[in-house]
Amino acid sequence: MNNDEQPPETRHLGQQSALPESPEVAVLDYVPNPRAGALYTIRFSAPEFTSLCPVTGQPDFAHLVIDYAPQATIVESKSLKLFLGSFRNHHGFHEDVTVGIGQRLFTEMTPLWLRIGGYWYPRGGIPIDVFWQSGPAPEGLWVPDQGVANYRGRG
């Protein structure tokens, strides 16, 4: 694929795309891994992630870090941004939101390995951090620290 060609089957890349109404209707695009066969880690950080408390309807804020070792495909970043943005109107507990994002990416993309850290800002004075991974990291994979400190006034 040349640099000026659009990857196959993308619905968002190079297109004007509206924010999906919900995570359920959000479409994630996957493109061929340009380094298939190489063992490497891809990281996405979303330091301004928001969703809604299912009880109060108030906004919850988190810093999400998604790490994965791809196989045949990689997630297209614009579609991931739109998917994560669709949670702005989604009511869900921190645990459901964090694990649900990780499981959807793992199920659809089928990477070798995936982990997600959800570093949630305090609600009621207690920060809640949620972690999920698909299993042990593959032997030889460089897995850096996620770089988000325990809560002491995150920023």
Image: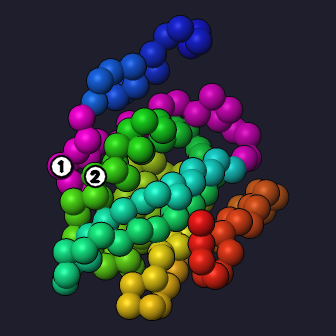
| 11 horizontally vs 152: left or right | left
Write down the quadrant of residue 140 in the picture.
bottom right
Residue at the far bottom: name it. Answer: 125
Give the magenta-colored segment's residue range: 18-40
Is residue 46 or residue 36 the one in the foreground?
Answer: 46
Give the crowd class for mark 2: few <14, some 14-19, many >=20 residues within 10 Å.
many
Reading the image, the residue beneath label 1 is 21
Residue at x 19%, y 75% (from the top left corner): 57
First-in-chain label (1 vs 2): 1
Residue 99 circle label:
none
Residue 84 in view (yes/no): yes
Determine whether label 1 and label 2 are within 8 Å by CB: yes
| 103 horizontally vs 17: left or right | right
Residue 107: x percent and y percent?
40, 57
Amino acid type, label 1: Glu
User: Where 84 sits versus 80, above or below?
Assistant: below
Residue at x 51%, y 55% (from the top left corner): 46
Residue 107 in view (yes/no): no
Based on the picture, tell me whether residue 38 belongs to the magenta stretch.
Answer: yes
Asked which colour scheme the image uses, the reply is rainbow
Residue 59: x percent and y percent?
30, 70
Amino acid type, label 2: Ser
Q: Quadrant of the N terminus?
A: top right
Q: Quadrant of the C terminus?
A: bottom right
Reading the image, the residue beneath label 2 is 86
- Marks 1/2: CA–CA distance: 6 Å
Residue 90: x percent and y percent?
23, 64
Based on the picture, tell me whether residue 27 belongs to the magenta stretch.
Answer: yes
